[in-house]
Image (spheres, helix red, strand yellow):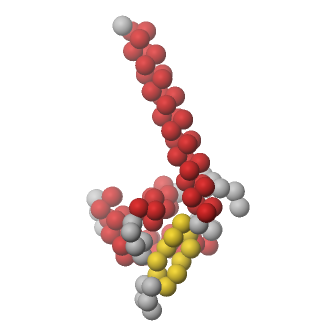
Amino acid sequence: MSASLKHLSAFQRDILYLVADLETPYGMGIKRALDEYYGEEINRGRVYQNLSKLVDEGHLDKSPIDKRTNSYTLTRTAVRAMEGRHQWQHSRANRQIQLEDLRTSLWH
Protein backbone atom coordinates (compact mmCIF):
# COMPACT_ATOMS: atom_id res chain seq x y z
CA MET A 1 0.00 0.00 0.00
CA SER A 2 1.48 3.33 -1.00
CA ALA A 3 1.79 6.06 1.57
CA SER A 4 -0.66 8.57 0.13
CA LEU A 5 -3.76 10.40 1.25
CA LYS A 6 -4.79 11.50 -2.27
CA HIS A 7 -7.77 9.18 -2.43
CA LEU A 8 -9.16 10.26 0.96
CA SER A 9 -11.78 12.94 1.44
CA ALA A 10 -10.91 16.10 3.36
CA PHE A 11 -13.16 14.80 6.16
CA GLN A 12 -11.15 11.57 6.36
CA ARG A 13 -7.88 13.51 6.43
CA ASP A 14 -9.29 15.67 9.23
CA ILE A 15 -10.05 12.50 11.19
CA LEU A 16 -6.45 11.33 10.80
CA TYR A 17 -5.11 14.67 12.03
CA LEU A 18 -7.45 14.55 15.03
CA VAL A 19 -6.41 10.99 15.87
CA ALA A 20 -2.80 12.20 15.85
CA ASP A 21 -3.69 15.17 18.05
CA LEU A 22 -6.04 13.70 20.66
CA GLU A 23 -4.60 12.23 23.84
CA THR A 24 -7.09 9.34 23.79
CA PRO A 25 -8.62 9.12 20.31
CA TYR A 26 -11.90 7.22 20.67
CA GLY A 27 -15.04 7.49 18.54
CA MET A 28 -17.08 10.04 20.48
CA GLY A 29 -14.00 12.09 21.34
CA ILE A 30 -13.14 12.28 17.64
CA LYS A 31 -16.76 13.23 16.89
CA ARG A 32 -16.69 16.04 19.47
CA ALA A 33 -13.41 17.36 18.06
CA LEU A 34 -14.93 17.31 14.56
CA ASP A 35 -18.04 19.13 15.85
CA GLU A 36 -15.80 21.81 17.30
CA TYR A 37 -13.63 22.12 14.21
CA TYR A 38 -16.56 22.32 11.77
CA GLY A 39 -18.66 24.49 14.09
CA GLU A 40 -21.67 22.22 13.77
CA GLU A 41 -22.81 18.81 14.94
CA ILE A 42 -21.47 16.02 12.74
CA ASN A 43 -23.63 12.93 12.29
CA ARG A 44 -22.30 10.09 14.45
CA GLY A 45 -22.91 7.58 11.65
CA ARG A 46 -20.74 9.62 9.29
CA VAL A 47 -17.90 9.61 11.81
CA TYR A 48 -18.03 5.87 12.48
CA GLN A 49 -18.47 4.99 8.81
CA ASN A 50 -15.32 6.95 7.97
CA LEU A 51 -13.40 5.52 10.93
CA SER A 52 -14.25 2.02 9.68
CA LYS A 53 -13.13 2.89 6.17
CA LEU A 54 -9.83 4.28 7.48
CA VAL A 55 -9.30 1.07 9.48
CA ASP A 56 -10.17 -1.09 6.44
CA GLU A 57 -7.75 0.87 4.25
CA GLY A 58 -4.88 0.49 6.73
CA HIS A 59 -4.66 4.09 7.93
CA LEU A 60 -5.95 3.41 11.45
CA ASP A 61 -5.67 0.58 13.94
CA LYS A 62 -8.64 0.00 16.22
CA SER A 63 -8.43 -1.54 19.67
CA PRO A 64 -11.08 -1.96 22.37
CA ILE A 65 -11.06 0.24 25.47
CA ASP A 66 -14.14 -1.46 26.88
CA LYS A 67 -17.17 -3.33 25.51
CA ARG A 68 -18.59 -0.20 23.84
CA THR A 69 -15.58 1.99 23.13
CA ASN A 70 -12.67 1.63 20.72
CA SER A 71 -9.52 3.68 20.49
CA TYR A 72 -7.85 4.50 17.21
CA THR A 73 -4.18 4.96 16.39
CA LEU A 74 -2.39 5.92 13.21
CA THR A 75 -0.60 3.18 11.33
CA ARG A 76 2.92 3.69 10.00
CA THR A 77 1.37 3.92 6.55
CA ALA A 78 -0.82 6.81 7.70
CA VAL A 79 2.08 8.62 9.37
CA ARG A 80 4.18 8.35 6.19
CA ALA A 81 1.24 9.51 4.09
CA MET A 82 0.60 12.46 6.40
CA GLU A 83 4.28 13.44 6.25
CA GLY A 84 4.14 13.27 2.45
CA ARG A 85 0.96 15.35 2.38
CA HIS A 86 2.54 17.93 4.71
CA GLN A 87 5.60 18.22 2.44
CA TRP A 88 3.40 18.56 -0.63
CA GLN A 89 1.26 21.28 0.98
CA HIS A 90 4.33 23.10 2.27
CA SER A 91 5.94 23.17 -1.18
CA ARG A 92 2.71 24.47 -2.77
CA ALA A 93 2.37 27.18 -0.12
CA ASN A 94 6.02 28.20 -0.55
CA ARG A 95 5.56 28.44 -4.31
CA GLN A 96 2.51 30.70 -3.81
CA ILE A 97 4.42 32.90 -1.37
CA GLN A 98 7.30 33.22 -3.84
CA LEU A 99 4.86 34.24 -6.60
CA GLU A 100 3.27 36.86 -4.32
CA ASP A 101 6.74 38.22 -3.47
CA LEU A 102 7.57 38.43 -7.18
CA ARG A 103 4.29 40.22 -7.96
CA THR A 104 4.86 42.66 -5.12
CA SER A 105 8.39 43.46 -6.27
CA LEU A 106 7.23 43.96 -9.89
CA TRP A 107 4.51 46.42 -8.89
CA HIS A 108 6.70 48.52 -6.56
In percent of the image, x 45 and y 27: which residue is there?
A: 97
Number of numbered tags placed on the structure image: 0
In percent of the image, x 56 and y 50: which residue is there?
A: 83
In percent of the image, x 52 and y 41: which residue is there?
A: 89
* In the image, residue 61 above or below residue 91: below
Of residues 107 and 58, the one nearer the viewer is 58
- Give the left or right position of residue 4, taking residue 104 as reference: right
* In the image, residue 89 above or below residue 74: above
**Name of the residue lying farthest toward the bottom:** 67
- Viewer can see residue 55: yes
Q: Residue 28, percent across and down? A: 37, 76
Q: Residue 54, percent across and down? A: 56, 68
Q: Residue 13, percent across and down? A: 50, 58
Quadrant into which the N terminus falls: bottom right
- Give the left or right position of residue 22, taking residue 94 as reference: left
In percent of the image, x 55 and y 53: which residue is there?
A: 82
Q: Please identify the quarter of the rendering in which residue 27 is found.
A: bottom left
Quadrant into which the C terminus falls: top left
Of residues 6 and 101, the one nearer the viewer is 101
- Viewer can see residue 5: no
* In the image, residue 70 above or below residue 92: below
- Give the left or right position of residue 105, taking residue 80 as reference: left
Of residues 107 and 78, the one nearer the viewer is 78
Q: Residue 81, percent across and down? A: 60, 54
